[in-house]
Amino acid sequence: MTTGKALYGKPHAGKTILLAIACGAIFVGSAVETVSIPSLHAPGLIDGDLSDASWGKAFATGAFKSADPHEALTESTEGWIFCDSENLYVAAKMRFADYAAHEKLLSANEERYTGDSVEVFIDPGDTGSYAQLGVTEAGTIMFSTGFCAPVSVGVQMHNGDWCMEAKIPFSAIKLSSDSFQPVWRMNLARNNRQKKELSSWSALDGRGFHDLGSFNYVKGIKADLVAIRKEQTFASRGEFEVELARRVYMTQKEVCGALDFVYGESMKGFRVIVTAKDASGKTVSEKSFSPVAFHVDFAFPINGFPDGRYDVDVALLDASGKTVKNASRTFWKVPPMPPNPVKLEIRDHCLYRDGKFVFPIVTTLCGWKGTCANKAEYVAKADAVFAELADCGFNFVTTQPRDFPEEDEIAMDRCQAIKPWDRKPYRDCKAAGVTFADYCAIAARHGVGVIARCPYLQYCTTPYATDRFVDHVRRIRTTPNLIGWHVSDEQDGRPEYNMMLNRLYHEIDPSRFTWINVINAVAQNIDTADIISTDPYPIPNSRLSMVASHGDRLVRNTEGRPGQARWLYLQTHGNHGNLTRPPTPGELRTMTMLAVNHGATGLAYFMWTPPEKRDGKNQHQEAMATLKELASVLRKWTPMLCRGKVVFRGRKGLLDVLAVEYKGRKIVSVVNDSDGDIAAAEIDVAGFGRITADVPRYDFKIIELTKEN
């Protein structure tokens, strides 16, 4: 037996669990099921009435399982699934005991976030990208992510249960792949907020609803996904679709683009005229092209064009010169990007700055309003905040709209770029003469880099807002200590929008990385940034293993993408929505190392809270001291844990284990995410031997195997 030396970890009070783990990983709960669903006649109405004969013949899921295998359910749920030639049909019956409580919520119109809901997850053809439908007991569609057309739902409330019925056309599910397996993956889940119970058809074992690896396999669906994908692709192009290769030009010598269109008659003698006009409406270029098979590739030179905004009109003309169809697009010409003095790159999912590995530890200063009477007061307050951040190990910070006080308030209002709570600090800083460059300079004095999020195009996507976005990013892209760009936050259902923002950032500034944070929809947004993160906030409503499942999702979706980093946004706050308390120091420690164990190459913590609000409700009193302690551990061990060869990652009984080899060193990170001390845990990893460790409750050990032990 090999005994590893515990190089990090400290004792906690709590119950003790004696644990011996022999060979291999031990997993709690059932395996993924493979089921067949029947093809049946459609029900008459989609109204929540499950008395139709089809539901009696449908596949029945049986009773849902608790999402937490350690907790029993008090209110049961079951589901049914079948299909016909064009649609998938899903139903569920949610039982409850207190009819009066449900009626009260419904009459108060409060069921959306406090009541009962059922969720449907569908991955057609097992592609790794899924659609999600959420329906409340009032019949409200809470969210519909991954759909490109409407679905039909109906609910009925009874004294003791409520039922949901859904008709989901195959063609309504947005397909993001060209290759499909014969099986689908699906899950049905219930979020019973009144009882604080989460349940699911699939066995989740605490991993959360969005753990695609736990979805069950479904056979028997005859949808022609290849044909549907082609139809969706064609439909998304439109009947007259113009696409420019870029929207922002710097040193490029010409604008390139393409036109695809549909036309049902003879096109003899037809021409396509491409006209470019400057902001004043003056024509600066006009060229003629001949269409071939309903397609035209076009280009025109822009050498010598002044910087500014241009409109391109693409018109299809018949033989007589009459315009049949036309469309316009916009591009911008901006000055060339000066060389960035800082070299940033992502290799093997890790961030490097000037060739040196960096483990990002990020926060956002939502809690700091930046109010000030003058510039000296602003600098003094900001210095104190950034001094604490640096002392606690933070090396990056993200921006708020108020961090750009030099922006025009009328423009900010017109683009919905500033919120009421930002108004006073924004005006104070503007009156004091504070600028974004000042913010970056103060952060730089403390070694904290700035990741900027342009306030424009966040809530308003008009041409005016796009103009402001391009101008803003162009102006601030040379600011010293600007490290990267934050594309968007929790915009899961808008991948096209996120892709557009990512594209604009990269075209205006190709030297810096982009970062997007989503709640769950990693697969749908995988191409929208260089860095992708999710934000599991489990306290107090979920198990801490939720962090592990989010990390696994990031790893699974970024496989084969070494140039894409994966971060996790971790919770430090409470007193917000259903997050009724913040994490304890032990929970912070556990979440941090679970994230690293499951592939995170950077961490963000939401959010920094002023000292006067670290009251145990908004944030735990010891949170910053805990983060400081963790930062020291992360600095020491992440160069190996993030870059080493993964020998094992997963559960060993009650423990979460990561074993890596790095340049001849063997390192094991062991996390106890249970509420009890674990004593004499024997961990057997192939090639590492058998390791014995004591791991306190909500804590971790990092063990390096040496010749001596």
Image (cartoon, rainbow, N blue to C red):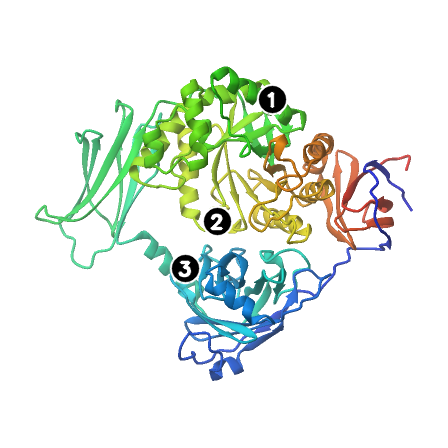
Say above or below: 364 vs 113. Answer: above
| Point 62% across, 32% down: residue | 612
| Point 43% across, 74% down: residue | 47
Which residue is label 2 attached to?
Answer: 492
Mark 1 residue type: Ala
| Point 57% across, 49% down: residue | 557
Say above or below: 309 vs 103. Answer: above
Mark 2 residue type: Asp
Tell me which corner region of the image, top left, top right, bottom left or bottom right, holds residue 661.
top right
Tell me which corner region of the image, top left, top right, bottom left or bottom right, holds residue 558.
top right
- Residue lying farthest top? 376
Question: In screen coordinates, is 675 left or right of 494?
Answer: right
Mark 2 or mark 3, whichever is nearer to me = 2
Give neighbour class at mark 1: few <14, some 14-19, many 20+ (Cα, 10 Å): few
Disc 1 to disc 2, C-alpha distance = 35 Å
- Residue lying farthest bottom? 53
The circle drawn on residue 384 is 1
Name the N-terminal-most of marks 1 and 3.
3
Mark 3 residue type: Arg
Which residue is label 3 attached to?
Answer: 229
Q: What percent of the width, then of the height, locates residue 595?
A: 67, 43
Q: What percent of the width, then of the height, locates residue 411?
A: 33, 31
Q: Quadrant of the C terminus?
A: top right
Q: Secondary structure at mark 3?
A: helix
Q: What percent of the width, then of the height, locates residue 59?
A: 56, 77
